[in-house]
Amino acid sequence: MDVENPRGQLLPGAYVSVHLTGPKAIRSVTVPANTLLFRAEGLQVGVVRHGQAELIPVTIGRDYGNTVEVVSGLQTTDPVIIDPADSLITGTPVQIKEQPGGGATPWPPSAVATRYPAGRSADGCFCRGSAPDVDS
């Protein structure tokens, strides 16, 4: 950091106390990077609402590599779909499994989402999902 010192009051090697004001905190959600869908309509994330996938437009902030900060579009309680198929559309039926590696296989397997325990992520649930390729 450079500080103006026109009167020479700050001497080399001297110690000072400084109070820095940073930017206001932005409410955000951190999600795995593999939840993002790059579409012509813009960046989207699939969430599970009422047993169906819903594509939500999002704005990302920081990119942490395996995770990204979402600064708008998601709530901390939104269960997001991890590894969504490129063919995922709003309205695709989704069944939520309670925890990875345990329990029964969901049926019908049109899309699967896994609700992780709340303690797994400070930012809410992550879900693992896929959707079939459907010919209409």
Image (spheres, rainbow, N blue to C red):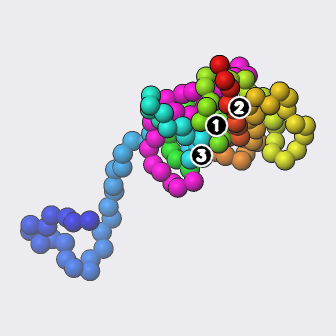
Position of residue 62 measured from the top left corner of the image (x, y, whole percent) = 45, 48
Q: What element carries label 1?
A: loop
Instruction: Tell me the distance, in whole angstroms, between the alpha carbons under discs 3 and 2.
Output: 18 Å
Amino acid carrying mark 2 in the image:
Pro
Label at residue 85 = 1
Label at residue 112 = none
From what the image shows, is residue 91 above or below residue 72?
above
Q: What element carries label 2?
A: loop
Kindly indicate the quadrant of the structure image that contains residue 126.
top right
- Which quadrant: the N terminus? bottom left
Q: Are marks 1 and 2 in contact (CB under 8 Å)?
A: yes
Q: Residue furthest bottom?
A: 13
Viewer-side residue, 17 vs 35: 35
Viewer-side residue, 96 vs 73: 96
Instruction: Tell me the distance, in whole angstroms, between the alpha carbons under discs 1 and 3.
Output: 11 Å
**Earlier sequence position, callout 3 versus callout 2:** 3
Magenta region, residue range: 44-66
Amino acid carrying mark 1 in the image:
Ala
Q: Is mark 3 on a helix, strand or loop?
A: helix
Viewer-side residue, 111 vs 135: 135
Label at residue 34 = 3
Q: Image point 66% across, 41% down: which residue?
A: 82
Q: How crowded is mark 1: few (under 14 residues within 10 Å), some or many (20 or more)?
A: some
In the figure, is residue 131 to the left or right of 13? right
**Earlier sequence position, callout 1 versus callout 3:** 3
Q: Image point 34% across, 50% down: which residue?
A: 21
Instruction: Tell me the distance, in whole angstroms, between the alpha carbons under discs 1 and 2.
Output: 7 Å
From what the image shows, is residue 110 above or below residue 63?
above
In the figure, is residue 19 to the left or right of 64? left
Q: Residues within 10 Å of mark 2 (few under 14, many from 20)?
A: some
